[in-house]
Image (cartoon, grey):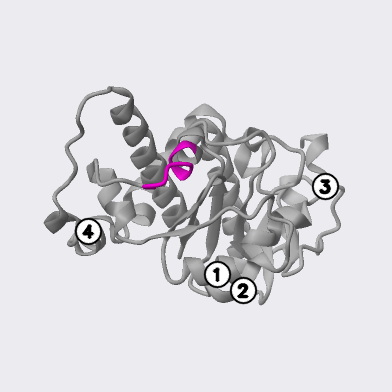
Amino acid sequence: MNPADGLSETSMRQQVSAQEWQARVDLAACYRLVAHFGWSDLVFTHITARVPGAQGQFLINPYGMMFEEITASSLVKIDQSGNKLDDTPHMVNPAGFLIHSAVHSVRHDAQCVLHAHSLNGVAVSAQKGGVLPLSQQSMFVLSSLAYHDYEGVALNEGEKARLVADLGDKTFFMLRNHGLLTVGPTIADAFLSMYLFEAACTIQIRAQSGGGPLVPVPDALVATAQQQASTVTKSLGARLVWPGLLRMLDRRDASYRE
């Protein structure tokens, strides 16, 4: 047991359902993967997941822990208002849950909401044209992309309605001058979407840095992006990519499972 975690794996695992424990393991893995791929912003973003079978309950990171430190037991259970439901010494950041609570309140199909301040994602979010059709990865993003204009640090409850109205039923959400957000029916799907989102932004920034003329994907192909994306990525996140990512984490450091 890590003293910083408050509860041992055994004690926490005994206190929750098997379904919640699995969600905890997957969410802790997601935090570790975000750290591994370099998308974290110290402790200042969040990934949330619904507690399976519990209405209005969510799992979130303990505020102040680096993403590479997070474990299944250290995740904190909160309600729709960001209040702690666990007997835990860990802090949560209710203000940081504002965007997530807004999305969870209307997108009941979203098991997971992943928000990142990745450097390339923020760079593209500051570009007037947003995501450009420059790569195969961008096709997946453009198939289900929405934008929200910057309103300052997300502390204003009044922004919630505008956030969810702009998101609509999309999977990829670019917060202008701020960062990226994805939703998914599973934690694995939300992660895979963020991987594609950040990859599209990274490729765009690198292509623009070359200084030469760019070759955009033809409009006719962009118009078919949604159909192509649903055909290629359907269930791949949960069935193929996610197990491989967990095997990678287990080889490197399996403590996320504790």
Question: Mark 1 touching mark 2, by CB under 8 A?
Answer: yes
Can you identify the residue that label 2 sits on?
105
Q: What amino acid does circle 3 point to?
A: His
Q: CA distance from mark 1 to mark 3?
A: 29 Å
* Residue 158 picture location, percent across and down: 70, 69
Q: CA distance from mark 4 to mark 3?
A: 43 Å
Question: Mark 3 touching mark 2, by CB under 8 A?
Answer: no
Task: Indicate the quadrant where residue 223 lies.
Answer: bottom left
Task: Indicate the quadrant where residue 145 lies.
Answer: bottom left
Q: Residue 90 — which label?
A: 3
Q: CA distance from mark 1 to mark 2?
A: 9 Å
The number of discs equals: 4
Instruction: Tell me the mark number nearer the camera, choosing from 4 and 3.
Output: 4
Q: Residue furthest top?
A: 210
* Label located before the other in sequence (1 or 3): 3
Can you identify the residue that label 4 sits on?
225
* Label located before the other in sequence (2 or 4): 2
Helix, strand or loop status at disc 1? helix
Q: Is residue 120 above or below residue 47?
A: above
Instruction: Tell me the mark number nearer the camera, choosing from 1 and 2.
Output: 1
Helix, strand or loop status at disc 3? loop
Q: What amino acid does circle 1 point to?
A: Val
Q: CA distance from mark 4 to mark 1?
A: 23 Å
* Residue 136 picture location, percent across and down: 22, 44
Residue drawn at x 43%, y 38% as measured from the top left: 247
Residue drawn at x 22%, y 56% as measured from the top left: 232
